[in-house]
Image (tube, grey):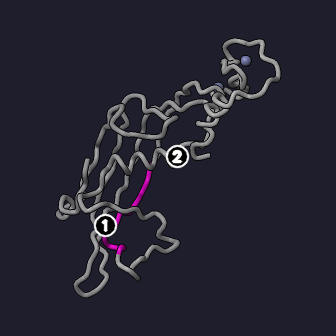
Amino acid sequence: MLITPAQLLDEPLSLNESFSEGSLDYAPDLRQVGPITLKGLAELLVEHRGPRQFVQDIRLRASYSGEFEQLCARCLEPVRRRMEGTFDLIFRPASADSQAGEHSITEDETEIGYYEESGLLLEDAVREQVLLALPGRILCRQDCKGLCSHCGINRNLSSCQCVDEPVNPRFAELAGIAIAHKG
Ligand SMILES: [Zn+2]
Ligand SMILES: [Zn+2]
């Protein structure tokens, strides 16, 4: 859903959206299960930067909730979890700060994002919030035994006869995927 300043000129826009599974791209180790719901409000904030110069910011306040599957950092089995959160963000037109000397992001303005000329894509904002809220690594259980670094077998499910031989780099790399993400 694209939100444009023109839509918000007269009054704020109430949001009551549902994003179906597969409509947003997350990270390689994260999958949305079922729809995400989002409720909130988008409104226009006008920044005056000079007598005839103003910038149309979009303020987005919303809460979301959805089910996700993230891969266990050790055994790579999907772990189901519910994620929900609220956010209050301001999006400024990307062109507004692009001129030299106009880069006005200060430390207390770190919550500012940007939207492209076409408008603010709500899906992008939601995806970013989910990724920010995501823990760097997750375990299917505290004592997950992980994958055998030699043969790749899931040691929670079965055991193998491997002894200490050189690590198969392919499985070491696989096991590292989930950890490397936002690690
Ligand atoms: Zn595990
Ligand atoms: Zn093994």
Q: Is residue 94 magenta?
A: yes
Location of residue 161 by image quarter: top right
Location of residue 151 by image quarter: top right
Q: Which is in the foreground here, disc 1 or disc 2?
A: 1
Q: Label 1's element?
A: strand
- Residue at position x 36%, y 73% from top? 97
Q: Which residues are magenta?
A: 86-98
Q: Is residue 87 magenta?
A: yes
Q: Is mark 2 within 8 Å of ligand 1?
A: no
Horizontally, residue 43 falls left or right of residue 154, namely: left
- Residue at position x 39%, y 40% from top? 25
Q: Nearer the viewer, residue 54 or 30?
A: 30
Residues at badges 1 and 2 in contact (C-beta under 8 Å)? no
Q: Give the image quadrant in which the ligand numbered 2 is located.
A: top right
Q: Label 2's element?
A: helix
Q: Nearer the viewer, residue 102 or 164?
A: 164
Residue 28 to residue 129: above or below: above
Report the residue marked by disc 1.
Answer: 93
Report the residue marked by disc 2.
Answer: 133
